[in-house]
Image (cartoon, helix red, strand yellow):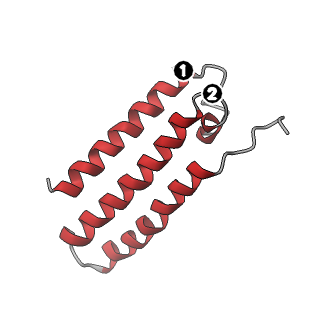
Amino acid sequence: MNAAGSVAAALFVYVILAAAALPFLRPEYDGSINWISDYAVGRLGWLQSSAFVATGAGVFTLLIGLVRLGPATWTVRTGLVFLAALAPGMCVAALFQTDLPGHP
């Protein structure tokens, strides 16, 4: 695995650990009826926001690795366009908190 792959894997492990910990740290949210972005509001919101940033950074790092080492077929290039759109989108999700249902 190259350096980009190792960094992306480490970032995604952090995201998985944060997503696994948040239901225990914030039991007032039910994951079956609430969006994951609801965890970014209130106490410990920084943890979900950091997971959004880590997802964006991981996708961007994965994108770099695939551009450098991946095959150059049209399907791969199409997928890279989608990854390029996802990376900044996840970072933007960290900047703007969601509106919780029933709150002003």
Local SS, label 2: loop
Which quadrant would residue 60 be assigned to in this image? bottom left
Q: Earlier in the sequence, mark 2 or mark 1?
A: 1
Residues 75 and 16: in front is: 16
Q: Which residue is drawn at 30% across and 59% down?
A: 62
Q: Is residue 103 left or right of residue 71?
A: right
- The residue wearing badge 1 is 25
| Up/down of 15 relative to 1, above or below | above
Neighbourhood count class around disc 1 (C-alpha, 10 Å): few under 14, some 14–19, many 20 upward: few
Q: Which amino acid does label 1 sit on?
A: Leu
Local SS, label 1: helix
Q: Residue at x 38, y 57 (%)?
A: 59
Residues 46 and 59: in front is: 46
Residues 32 and 22: in front is: 22
How far across and how far down the image is residue 19, in percent?
A: 47, 33
How far across and how far down the image is residue 31, in percent?
A: 60, 30
Q: Residue at x 54, y 42 (%)?
A: 49
How far across and how far down the image is residue 75, in percent?
A: 34, 75
Quarter holding the C terminus is top right
- The residue wearing badge 2 is 43
Q: What residue type is labelled 2?
A: Arg
| Up/down of 94 relative to 31, above or below | below
Neighbourhood count class around disc 2 (C-alpha, 10 Å): few under 14, some 14–19, many 20 upward: few
